[in-house]
Image (cartoon, helix red, strand yellow):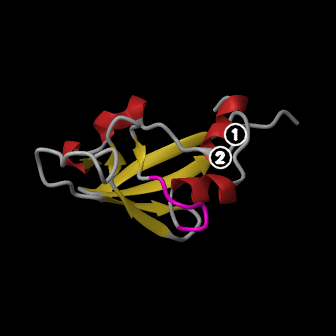
Amino acid sequence: MRKEDVWTFTQRNVSLWDILDFFPPDAVGPRGPGDPPRPYDVKPLTVETDLGWSFESDIQFGSWVFRPRSPRQPGMMKWCRERGLEEGDVLVFERLADRRYRLRLEKAATNT
């Protein structure tokens, strides 16, 4: 990841746009509670993290991020903050089952 991504990922959210096809289409939910429902039943995903906890979420339509929540609650922002992201790190999503994924971090190689 780029240096500017570290701030975005820890203070805002992680865009899933570039890997959206990796997730089932029915995991995309409405943008917000005031928006019309999607033309299908939205089914959330479970993301198991390398920090030993998991979270359940859909993907927010239009923003293409896991549903935002407080960084104190299990979710993408909490993982990004607790994981200690740095420039050059890589976020890795692995499909475990139909609606289950693992999220882990590959640390950037250090020049020693």
The residue under label 2 is which amino acid type? Gln
Mark 2 sits on what residue? 11
Image height of 32 relative to 6, above or below: below
Q: Could you tell me residue 101's position as x and y percent?
A: 38, 56
The residue under label 1 is which amino acid type? Trp
Q: Does the magenta segment cover residue 69? A: yes
Mark 1 sits on what residue? 7
Q: Could you tell me residue 8's position as x and y percent?
A: 63, 38
How far apart are labels 2 and 1 at the CA level? 6 Å
Q: Does the magenta segment cover residue 23? A: no
Answer with the quarter of the image where residue 99 lies: bottom left
- Compared across the picture, whether 73 is left or right of 60 comes to right
Residue bounds of the magenta highlight: 68-73
**Viewer-closest of 97 and 44:** 44
Instruction: From the image, give the main secondary structure of the stretch colored magenta.
Output: loop
Image height of 71 relative to 105, above or below: below
Residue at (27, 48) in percent of width and height: 29
Per the image, label 2 sits on a secondary structure element best described as helix
Residue at (11, 48) in percent of width and height: 40
Per the image, label 1 sits on a secondary structure element best described as helix
What is the number of callouts on the image? 2
Q: Could you tell me residue 93's position as x and y percent?
A: 44, 47
Q: Which quadrant of the rendered structure holds the C terminus?
A: top right
Q: Mark 2 and 1 residues: CB-CB less than 8 Å, in contact?
A: yes
